[in-house]
Amino acid sequence: ANLFLGGMIAGRILHRGFGGPRMEMMGGAGQVNWIVKRIAEDLPQAQQDVFRDAMNARKDQLVTMGKELRDAREAVKAAIETKPFNRAAYDSAATTMSQRQTAFSAELADAVGDSMELAAGKPAGN
């Protein structure tokens, strides 16, 4: 469910239009800022600042997890490029990447959900 929700959010954001740089071309804080900006644009003006502030409170965690995910992707790439190919090293790197992707997607979905609730005037997590 978390991967589906994360994919759905990312798909909506990535395919919304052609203005500005695409998220996958950015890294770290740039990705988180881009996501927050794109979602906030759809909110009523009165809710935008509350949403941004709530997301900014979670930005450091999301950036850290995003960097860990990028490192895991690089480890998979390195395992694929290693000669001779070592299946155990590849499997380990792929498992780590999958775990970090799941964790990042869950954290992003939770942060967006909590921030949307706060922007709507509800306590987060209800």
Image (spheres, helix red, strand yellow):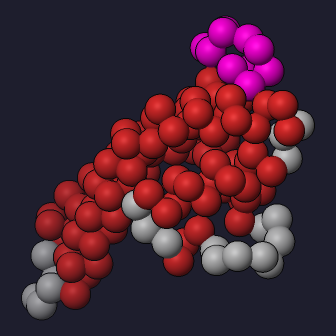
Position in image of residue 27 (x %, y %):
43, 67
Tell me the residue at 52%/53% (across/down): 32
Q: Quadrant of the N terminus?
A: top right
Q: Can residue 76 be seen in this view?
A: no
**Range drawn in magenta:** 117-126
Task: Give the total of numbered labels.
Answer: 0
Tell me the residue at 21%/79% (across/down): 78
Is residue 13 toward the left or the right of residue 110 in the image?
right
- 98 w.r.t. 18: above or below: above
Most foreground residue, 124 or 72 = 124
Is residue 20 toward the left or the right of residue 3 in the image?
right
Position in image of residue 84 (x %, y %):
10, 88
Tell me the residue at 29%/78% (across/down): 77
Q: In which quarter of the image is the C terminus?
A: top right
Most foreground residue, 53 or 25 = 53
Is residue 17 toward the left or the right of residue 29 in the image?
right
Main SS, magenta region, reads: loop
Position in image of residue 62 (x %, y %):
42, 44
Residue 87 colored in magenta in the image: no
